[in-house]
Amino acid sequence: MRQTNRFLSLMVLVPLLLFSGLAQADKTYRLRLAETWGPNFPIFGDTTKNLAAMVEKMSNGRLKITIDSSNKHKAPFGVFDMVKSGQYDMGHSASYYWKGKVPATMYFTTMPFGMIAPEQYAWFYYGGGMELMDELYAQHNLMSFPGGNTANQMGGWFQKEINTVEDLQGLKMRIPGFAGEVLAKLGAKPTNIPPGELYTALDRGTIDALEWVGPSLDLRMGFHKIAPYYYTGWHEPGAELQFLVNRKKFDSLPADLQEILRVGMKASAYDMYTQSMHESGKNWSTMKQEYPNIKVKTFPEPVMQAIREANDALLKENAANDAFAAKVLASQQAYMDKVRQWTLMSDKAYLDSVAR
Amino acid sequence: MRQTNRFLSLMVLVPLLLFSGLAQADKTYRLRLAETWGPNFPIFGDTTKNLAAMVEKMSNGRLKITIDSSNKHKAPFGVFDMVKSGQYDMGHSASYYWKGKVPATMYFTTMPFGMIAPEQYAWFYYGGGMELMDELYAQHNLMSFPGGNTANQMGGWFQKEINTVEDLQGLKMRIPGFAGEVLAKLGAKPTNIPPGELYTALDRGTIDALEWVGPSLDLRMGFHKIAPYYYTGWHEPGAELQFLVNRKKFDSLPADLQEILRVGMKASAYDMYTQSMHESGKNWSTMKQEYPNIKVKTFPEPVMQAIREANDALLKENAANDAFAAKVLASQQAYMDKVRQWTLMSDKAYLDSVAR
C-alpha cells in the first residue's frame, strides 16, 4: 500500500511540475501602445493594427497589443515621455517630433535632400543606422525601430508659382519642423496651424501654401480642390515613422515574444511603405481625374539651390553644437554618397529610359 | 482510504490531460527547404538563413526550417516539382524559372519595361498580385510568396558599345529567359552558359556580352575586370525571388506557426531588397575605385524603342495563347499606369532635382 501511494505521489508531482513550467510559457503579455495619430487615421493607423494582428496570431494570443489613439491619451506629442516612464509600453510616432527634447532624434525620420526610402532602409539595417539610433534612445530607457515609410513626400500645395528665390520672401506656409527653419532662412514665414483648420486657411488666404504628405493622405484633406500647384518634394524624401518600446518592458518579455515583436514591427513598417506607394498611385489618379488642371511643378534650379544652401548651413550649425548629431550626419552622408550612385544608375536610369 | 485514492486519481488525471494538450502545442514541426542556389550563395542564401533564424526564434524552436542547397538536392530547377510532390516542404527559387512548365508563372518575378521593386510590392500586396499568384499556384498544390528582390538589374557587361539596332545583330549574349527571346527577335544570339564558365567565355570572346544581376552579385564574378561597358537595365527592373510552400504541408501547421512562417517570409523578402540596395551601393563603389574607366551606358533611344516593340509583340502573342497570362498582364499594366505616375512625380522628380 505504501508503495502504491509513493508511486501515485510521483504520478501527481511530475506532471504538476511540468504543467507549471508550461503554464509559465503560456502566460499572456499585454503591451499598451500610444500612437500620435487620432483613431482610424489611414495608413499610419493601419500600421499599428497590422502589427497588433500579426503578433497576436504569431504568439497564439500570448502577446496582445492594445492601441490607444490620441483621443484616448490626449498627448500626441507626449508619446516619448509616456513610453520612457512606462506609462505606456510602446509608441507609434516619428523620431523628429522629439528634436526639442533630444535634438539628434531629428535625423532618424528623414532629411531634406537626404535618402529615399529604399536607400534609408539600407542605411538603417546594413549601414549602421540602427546602431546609432539604438545608442541615442538607450539613454532614455527606450528602443526605437523603423515604423513605416510615407514614401517621398510632396513639396506641397501652392496658390502661386514659385519662379525665383524672391517668391519665397514673406510666403506664409504651413511647413513644420526643420524644413520650416530652412525656408525661414530664405524669408518664408512658416506657420503652424492645426490640421483641421488647414483647408480653410489655404482657401481663405490665411496661408499661401502648405505641405502635408502626398496623394496618399492629401486626397481626403481636399487641398487639390483649392490650390492649382502641386510641387514635387525636397524636404522629406523618405519619412520613416517610429515604433518606440520601453526598454525594461522589452527586456522582461520571453525571447520568443521579443522576436515576434521585432519581426512584427519590421514587417508592418515595410508594409506601410508598400501601402503608401499604393495609396499615392490610386489617389493621384483620382485627383487628376476630378481636377485635370492641377499642375505638378518642381522648384526651378536656382530656387532649389538656394534651399539646399540654407539647409546645409543649418546642418553645419547643428553638427557644430552636438557631437552626436555630427556623428549621425557623417554616417548618413558617407552612406548616401555610395547608395545614391547605385540609385542613379539603376532605378533613375531605368525610369529615364522608359519614360522618355 | 477509497476517498483518498479517488482524490489522488483526479490529481493524476487532470494535470495529465492538461499536460497532454499542452504537449501537443509544444510539438516541433520541421520543414525541409530546397533552394535553387548553391551553398552560401550571397544575398539569396542569406534570405533563407534569415527566414530560418527568425521562425525558429519566434516559435521558440517549435518550427525549424532546414535548408538544402543545390549541392545537396542536385536539382536547382527541380524545386517546383519537389515541393509540389512533397519531397520538400518549401523552396526558394524564382517564379519565372517555371515558364516551360506553367507559362504564366513568368509574370510573377519581373517583366521587361515593368514595375520597379516598390511598385511591384504594391501590386502584390495591395493591387491584386498575390491573389493572381495564389490562383495559379493553387492548381499545383503550391503556395507562392515574394522571396526577396534583387533591386533593378543592370542590362549587362558589353565588350562593344551598342549604338544602333544593327549592333544587336549577331550579338552573342548570355541573357536567359524571356529577355533573351526579346533580343533574339532583333537578331541577337542568346546563349546559355553555366555561371562558372561565364568569365572565361566573356574574356575569350566566346560571347560578346552577358547580364548577371547588378553590382551586388557581379563584383565577385569579376566581369568588370574584362568588359569596359556596363549598360543600365531594362529587362528585370525588380526581380522578386519566390518562396514556394507545399499547400497541404502549410495547412497541416497550427495557425500560429502558419502566421510565423507567413510573416517571416514577408520580412526576409523585404530584407533582401534592402540588402541588395546596400550591397550594390557598396560593391559599385569598390568596382569604380578599382576600375575607374568602366563606362555606365544606356542604350540609345531608338535601340530601346526597338527592344520595347519586340517585347510588346511577344507579350501580345503570349496573351493571345493563354487566358490567364492575359489576365495577369492586364492587371499589371493597369496597375503600373497608376503607380508609375506617382513614382515619376515623387522619387524620379526628386532625384532629377537633387542630381542636376
Image: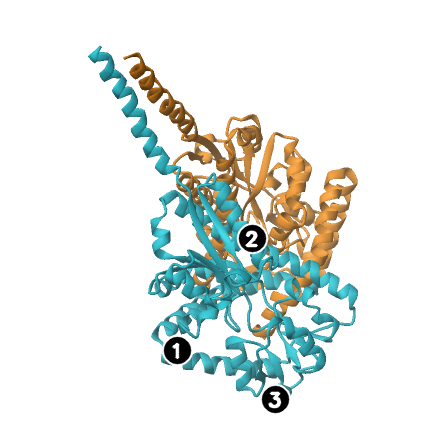
Chain colours: A cyan, B orange
Q: Which quarter of the figure has residue A2?
A: top left
Task: State which tag comes first along the sequence, 1 or 2.
Answer: 2
Label 2 sits on a secondary structure element that is helix
Q: Which mark is residue A319?
A: 1
Label 3 sits on a secondary structure element that is loop
Q: Are marks 2 and 3 on the same chain?
A: yes
Q: Is residue B240 above or below residue A152?
A: above
Q: Which mark is residue A271?
A: 2
Q: Is residue B250 above or below residue A257?
A: above
- Horizontal side, residue B164 vs residue B39: left or right: right
Task: State which tag comes first along the sequence, 2 or 3.
Answer: 3
Q: Of residues B319 and B158, which is closer to you in this image?
A: B319
Taking the spot 48% from the left edge, 52% from the top edge, the residue there is A265
- Horizontal side, residue A15 vs residue A66: left or right: left
Q: Is residue B141 visible?
A: yes
Measured as percent of width and height from the top left, residue A81 is found at 41, 65
Measured as percent of width and height from the top left, residue B279 is found at 46, 56
Amino acid carrying label 2: it is Asp
Measured as percent of width and height from the top left, residue A224 is found at 72, 70
Question: On the image, numbered disc 3 is attached to which residue?
Answer: A169
- Horizontal side, residue A339 vs residue A84: left or right: right
* Classed neighbour count for the residue bearing mark 3: other residues with Cα under 10 Å, few (<14), some (14–19), many (≥20): some
Point out the image quarter for the N terminus of chain B: top left
